Image: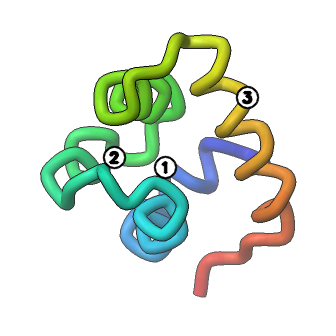
């Protein structure tokens, strides 16, 4: 998954993120703004997991959404 594309199309993409990580608020999603490192940090905070676990979850998310195309 190309995070430059995600960042550029964040408004369309953040619904997928919210579906995956429901504890992230709209404010969190606005702060993340498509930045992968910000998403890692917010997952760590919201779910109480370490960085490795957050990275693992994101990699799994990327695999499930690898064909994402913004409309």
Q: Earlier in the sequence, mark 3 or mark 2?
A: 2
24 relative to 52, above or below = below
Point 41% across, 64% down: residue: 18
Return the residue at label 1: 7
Return the residue at label 2: 33
26 relative to 15, above or below = above
* CA distance for labels 1 and 3: 20 Å
SS type, badge 2: loop
Point 44% across, 35% down: residue: 39
Mark 3 crowdedness (10 Å alpha carbons): few <14, some 14-19, many ≥20? few
Provide residue 71's location: percent of width, then percent of height: 59, 87
Provide residue 7's location: percent of width, then percent of height: 49, 49
Which of discs 1 and 3 lies nearer the camera? The answer is: 3
Which of discs 3 and 2 lies nearer the camera? The answer is: 3
Question: Is the Cβ of the residue at disc 2 closer than 8 Å to that at disc 1?
Answer: yes
SS type, badge 1: helix
* CA distance for labels 2 and 1: 6 Å
Mark 1 crowdedness (10 Å alpha carbons): few <14, some 14-19, many ≥20? some
In the drawing, does residue 21 fall left or right of residue 70? left
């Amino acid at each position: 998954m190309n995070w430059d594309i995600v960042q550029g199309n964040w408004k369309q993409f953040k619904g997928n993120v919210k579906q995956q990580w429901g504890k992230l608020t709209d404010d969190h999603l606005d702060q993340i703004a498509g930045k992968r490192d910000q998403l890692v940090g917010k997952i760590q905070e919201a779910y109480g997991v370490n960085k490795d676990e957050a990275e693992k979850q994101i990699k799994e998310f990327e695999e499930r959404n690898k064909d994402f195309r913004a409309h």
